[in-house]
Image: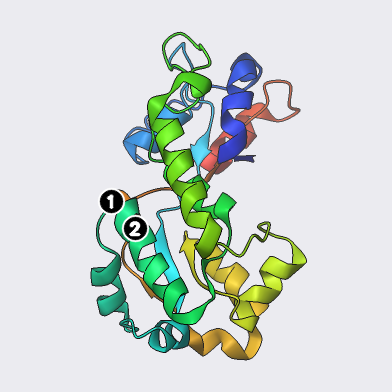
Amino acid sequence: MIEVDWMPEVMQYSDLLEDLTSAETEGRWLESKVADATDADGRLIGAGTDVGPEAVCYRASLFEEAGLPSDPEGVAELLTGDWANFFEVGQQYSDATGKAFFDSTVGIWQGMIGQINPAFEDADTGEIIATDNADVKAAYEQATAAAADQSTGFTQWAEDWNAGMSNGDYATMLCPPWMLGVIEGNVGDAADDWNIANVFPNGGGNWGGSWLTVPSNGANVDEAKKRPCG
């Protein structure tokens, strides 16, 4: 199984993996899911398992404390727009409460950078463009400026980040479906206070997703190919 962040690395060795193209896999997944697992020779080297469309998870009581809407529809309407609007709402929250609006600058950055295409590397030439990419620079400056007042300063997955979910240290976090399990595992009695708004700054994003692959040097290649594809 290959997680989405590792797929570009795996693609360097796609010739060591079986081509899963077949009548059974035709049209089975989203086009973007297929494209990310198709190598330069047109070989499908991964069978998709999931994707990670994002929303915004939030703590209703903290929004109420700041005088902001706290029902999912109201929060979605409040946060509809671009990242500038998200950070404007965040500043209102921080000014009203003196608390951090979002969980981690890295988490916010992940959502922002995922909307920039291309971000770090030219898809056609393989040239590294990150240091010269004006869109990356603008997003970085926007995120770090907002972080001064709105971020906890926590590192995602660290103990203080985990504890902050139940302690009320932050009001929002970017939320793909699998993040719900992380929240449920950390918040305990605060579970009823967390909710989901069907909205994502700047229109949408994806964080996560995996593929099943079949190494060509496996002992039972034909049988293995039937499992993810049949």
Q: Which label number is shown at residue 167?
A: none
Q: Quadrant of residue 159?
A: bottom right
Give the residue displayed 57% in from the left and 26% down from the top. 8
Neighbourhood count class around disc 2 (C-alpha, 10 Å): few under 14, some 14–19, many 20 upward: many
Q: In front: 128, or 33? A: 128
**Residue visible at 74% across and 61% down?**
158
Q: Residue at x 61, y 68 (%)?
A: 182
- Crowding at dot 1, Cα within 10 Å, few <14 / some 14-19 / many 20+, comes out as few
Relative vertical location of residue 213 with respect to residue 11 in this rendering, above or below:
below
Residue 23, percent from left and from top: 37, 30
Q: Is residue 50 visible?
A: no
In the rendered image, the quadrant that contains the N terminus is: top right
Image location (x, y in percent) of residue 199: 31, 63
Name above or below for residue 16 compared with residue 141: above
- The image quadrant of residue 92 is bottom left
How far from the left and from the top, in percent, is residue 207? 49, 49
Residue 228 locus on image (x, y percent): 54, 41
Q: Is residue 213 above or below residue 13?
A: below
Residue 203's disc number = 1
What SS does tag 2 mark? loop
Pick the residue in front: 124 or 164. 164
Instruction: Tell me if residue 125 can be seen.
Output: yes
Judging depth in this view, the residue of 33 and 72 nearest the camera is 72
Amino acid type at mark 2: Phe
Q: Amino acid at mark 1?
A: Gly
Q: Secondary structure at mark 1?
A: helix
Q: Is residue 93 left or right of residue 204?
A: right
Q: CA distance from mark 1 to mark 2?
A: 6 Å
Query: What residue sits right under mark 2 in the picture?
Result: 200
